[in-house]
Image (cartoon, rainbow, N blue to C red):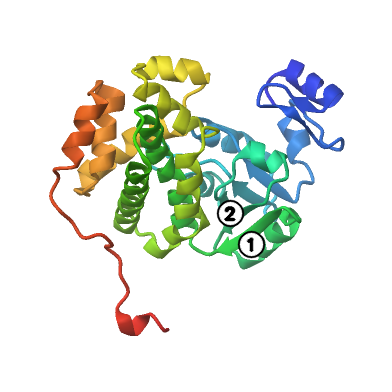
Amino acid sequence: MRDAERVAEINTTHFNARYLPDYPLAPTLEATTELKVALEDAEAVFISVPSHAVREVVQQSAPLLTPDQLLISTTKGIEAQTFSLMSEIIADEIAGARIGVLSGPNLAKEIARHQLTATVIASQDEALRQRIQQLLHCPYFRVYASSDTYGVELGGTLKNIYAIAAGMSAALGMGENTRSMLMTRSLAEMSRFAVSMGANPMTFLGLAGVGDLIVTCMSPLSRNFRVGFALGEGKSLEQAVSVLGEVAEGVNTLRQVRDKALEKDIYMPLVTGLYEVVFNGAPVAAIARSMMVNAQSSDVEFVLPRDACGQ
């Protein structure tokens, strides 16, 4: 941690008063301000800082790491200048690194309460996947594996955008029909964008896609949902962020994805409309109505041929 006072507080009280004040931390957990101390002799290193800080932290860590250490990103975001996902940043900065991505419907407070939860470890490194499954698996936390690192990471990143839209719709008092439509059309947009970027659309049917989308779009515990709810109440983006106390990743991701969609001519009406609300102050109700008169499209875009379904 950067703050020595918070380090002392955690090591003394075994509580993180800022982020999880009601949940005791393991007595064996030691906080430190020294990166070298944190990394030394660690078999697995989980990189869990805000997306805008990942490259800097990885650069600082690189001289302190060994080639056999497992580097696992849990950060969901896109770097503004490069459109790089977090695993790509790690690969850029540390040649030959053993990299994985952990993503799924994983609200921190529910995990801290030991509620049943599942996640996905994605990596091209089979030994890494197996080891992280062994390290993290416990009676209330199930870890599935995937080799589609890019798809898993992209799913966890994109869903933050649609959680903002879900928060808005909740604030406006829209019904369950609307919520269902929003989530399924969000999944269609996520899949469409993923395919254009080279990911497997089938990955989005799993925990890191539809699973994470559902929990983030339905839970007031989600930071992105809370930003959207504040916007739906009529607050400006600055007011919404001030209520939250930090910028939700979905706000930054929205800008990056909207620009990339324009560049690659990808049809993403939800992203386009949400961008107008968040950054240009467009009326939420007017944008919602405009989405209902867009050109008709097929319901499911990636359907396997009948003869492939049994394979």
Residue at position x 74%, y 60% from top? 134
Residue at position x 74%, y 35% from top? 36
Whether residue 160 sits left or right of residue 294 in the image: it is right
Judge whether residue 14 can be spotted in this image.
yes
Residue 16 drawn at (x, y percent): 73, 26
Kind of residue sitting beneath label 2: Gly
Relative to 290, say whether 135 is above or below: below
Question: Sequence order check: which comes first, mark 2 or mark 1?
Answer: 2
Give the structural element (helix, strand or loop) at label 1.
helix
Residue at position x 46%, y 32% from top? 224
- Locate the C terminus by quadrant: bottom left
Which is nearer the eye, 73 or 68? 73
Asked whether disc 2 touches disc 1, contact meaning CB atoms under 8 Å apart, the reply is yes
Tell me the quarter of the picture where residue 90 sits. top right
Residue at position x 66%, y 66% from top? 127
Kind of residue sitting beneath label 1: Arg
Labelled disc at residue 129? 1
Where is mark 2, residue-wise? 100
- Number of numbered tags placed on the structure image: 2
The answer for how far apart the CA atoms under marks 2 and 1 are is 8 Å
